[in-house]
Image (cartoon, rainbow, N blue to C red):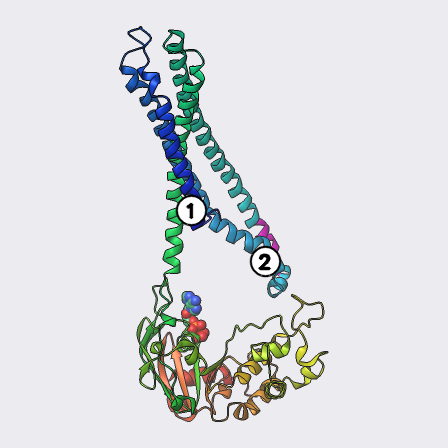
């Protein structure tokens, strides 16, 4: 917020040189003040050689100490601005401007909570004003110590001139030189302290920039065999906890995903299914264990190439305020026929026909007056079409039909085989009836895989989690 990065250090260098030259020159110009004699034993005493520089050094030390105090206040203040700015951006801005939050803000009167938080920020601001006041007091006292030192030196020069050591005109030279000396010493401390602050900030920045990105380290290309559809992905004793968290979200997970198979991941909320998929797409690294593609750790593959193998639709997918075609192709250029084919497979044809500009229709009104608003279910279908357009050999769908109406859901499932064809499909769904046609169902419970098998096999396990989940859901459908 305040730093000018490396530029600040570069700009400070001439200041430091100027200050050092200033100190040398003014010390040289004031040397004869001490050597010229008045004939008065007190004024000619060598003690002044210690007293005057002593006063200068003392004033320098006092202003340095005050500077340090000011730095500490400043540091504390800048630290608190991180929280302040985040809170302000959320309560004062995002909460009111994000359309996704608009309904809840109004219906649950979350504006009141925002007001309360904004008042807390005001309160914080008042404290900040005090902090800034203390900083000004430090600055003022520092100036006072420098001015007092300058005045004492000038008094000494005036006394010597009065006693005839040098003509009165020299007082101006000595006072100027000594004042300059005091200022330069003060500035030296200022430059040093400013550099200390900036280097600390830069150290944080560089430490951040130097964070090794394990995701980008692999270089192995994806070989032809994989492209042709022969691959096996294996989770081998994978455990994972999110950065900064102590609890394992996945524990000792071992699973094999085979090409061409349709596999379902089921389990209660928070069981770890999405996390499993996030590890698969290398958004995170396993804390323990390995994920292997054809026997090779996925970290060794070139990340871009590896990711081309997958099309994902996450629960919390996001679309952009671009045209429908650009959203589906995830790029500027697109093949119209292919995009329309994906729209059909994602059961979006009817809505598509009503769109004013076809694939050129802009989604949302964030950046265009002509943009159209779409429902949650329509957005989910577009996200599905985007995954299909990518045409990757593995398609991963996290709750792909959660926002769809029953007819659209049925359409998507009816077309699912055609959509997926000989691709590998991994999908997470709470609608167990839609998982029953999968080749394998993997059941997660509290971060562990507790069951694996086909629907028929799992239904036979009388004390199994799958049967429990199935029964819980089935009771609402039995008439
Ligand atoms: P599921 O998909 O089975 O509902 P998730 O994999 O999304 O479950 O979540 C598993 C657990 O991981 C949850 O308890 C959740 O709170 C936690 N979790 C998810 N995302 C994060 C995150 N980014 N940081 C910390 N914990 C997370």
| Residue 330 position in % (x across, y down) | 56, 77
Q: Is residue 476 visible from the viewing direction of this image?
A: no
Indicate whether 62 appears above or below 124. Answer: above
Q: Residue at x 38, y 28 (%)?
A: 25
Main secondary-structure element of the magenta-colored stretch: helix
Q: Which residue is mark 2?
A: 95
Q: Which residue is mark 1?
A: 10
Q: Are marks 1 and 2 in contact (CB under 8 Å)?
A: no
> How many tags in the picture?
2
Work out how far the residue at label 1 is from the one at label 2, CA to CA, in angstroms. 41 Å
Ligand 1: which quarter?
bottom left
- 472 or 147, which is in the foreground? 147
Mark 1 or 2, closer to the camera: 1
Q: Quick one: quadrant of the C terminus?
A: bottom right
Q: Which residues are magenta?
A: 108-116
The mark that comes first in sequence, 1 or 2, is 1
- 82 or 52, which is in the foreground? 52
Q: Taking 281 as reference, is 55 left or right?
A: left
- 472 or 33, which is in the foreground? 33
- Give the quarter of the image for residue 26: top left
**Can you name the residue that lies furthest to the left here?**
46
Indicate whether 101 appears above or below 116. Answer: below
| Residue 298 position in % (x across, y down) | 35, 79
- Give the quarter of the image for residue 95: bottom right
């Amino acid at each position: 917020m305040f730093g000018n990065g490396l530029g600040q250090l570069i700009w400070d260098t001439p200041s430091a040189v100027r200050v050092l030259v200033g100190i040398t020159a003014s010390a040289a110009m004031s040397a004869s003040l001490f050597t010229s004699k008045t004939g008065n034993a007190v004024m000619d005493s060598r003690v002044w050689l210690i007293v005057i520089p002593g006063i200068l050094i003392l004033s320098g030390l006092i202003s340095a100490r005050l500077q340090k105090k000011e730095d500490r206040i400043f540091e504390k203040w800048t630290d608190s601005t991180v929280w302040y700015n985040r809170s302000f951006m959320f309560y004062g801005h995002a909460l009111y401007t994000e359309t996704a939050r608009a309904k809840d803000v109004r219906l649950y009167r979350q504006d009141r909570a925002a007001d309360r938080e904004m008042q807390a920020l005001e309160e914080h601001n008042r404290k900040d004003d005090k902090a800034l006041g203390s900083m000004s007091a430090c600055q003022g006292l520092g100036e006072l110590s420098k001015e007092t030192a300058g005045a004492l030196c000038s008094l000494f020069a005036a006394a010597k001139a009065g006693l005839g050591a040098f003509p009165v005109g020299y007082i101006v030279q000595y006072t100027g030189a000594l004042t300059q000396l005091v200022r330069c010493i003060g500035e030296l401390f200022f430059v040093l302290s400013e550099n200390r602050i900036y280097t600390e900030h830069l150290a944080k920045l560089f430490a951040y920039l130097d964070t090794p990105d394990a995701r980008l380290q692999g270089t192995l290309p994806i070989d032809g065999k994989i492209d042709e559809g022969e691959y096996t992905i294996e989770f081998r004793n994978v455990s994972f906890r999110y950065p900064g968290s102590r609890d394992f979200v996945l524990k000792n997970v071992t699973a094999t995903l085979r090409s061409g198979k349709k596999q379902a991941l089921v389990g209660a909320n928070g069981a770890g299914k999405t996390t499993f998929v996030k590890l698969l797409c290398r958004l995170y690294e396993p804390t323990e264990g390995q994920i292997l593609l054809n026997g090779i750790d996925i970290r060794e593959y070139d990340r871009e190439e590896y990711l081309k193998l997958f099309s994902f639709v996450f629960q919390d997918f996001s679309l952009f305020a671009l045209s429908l075609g650009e959203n589906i192709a995830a790029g500027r250029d697109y093949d119209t026929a292919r995009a329309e084919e994906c729209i059909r497979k994602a059961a979006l044809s009817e809505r598509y026909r009503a769109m004013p500009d076809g694939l050129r229709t802009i989604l949302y009104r964030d950046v265009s007056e002509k943009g159209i608003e779409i429902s949650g279910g329509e957005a989910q279908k577009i996200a599905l079409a985007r995954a299909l357009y990518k045409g990757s050999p593995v398609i991963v769908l996290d709750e792909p039909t959660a926002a769809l109406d029953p007819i659209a859901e049925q359409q998507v499932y009816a077309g699912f085989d055609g959509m997926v064809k000989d691709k590998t499909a991994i999908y997470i769904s709470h609608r167990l009836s839609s998982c029953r046609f999968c080749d394998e169902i993997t059941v997660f419970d509290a971060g562990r895989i507790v069951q694996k098998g086909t629907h028929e096999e799992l239904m036979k396990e009388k004390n199994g989690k799958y049967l429990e989940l199935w029964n819980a859901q089935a009771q609402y459908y039995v008439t």
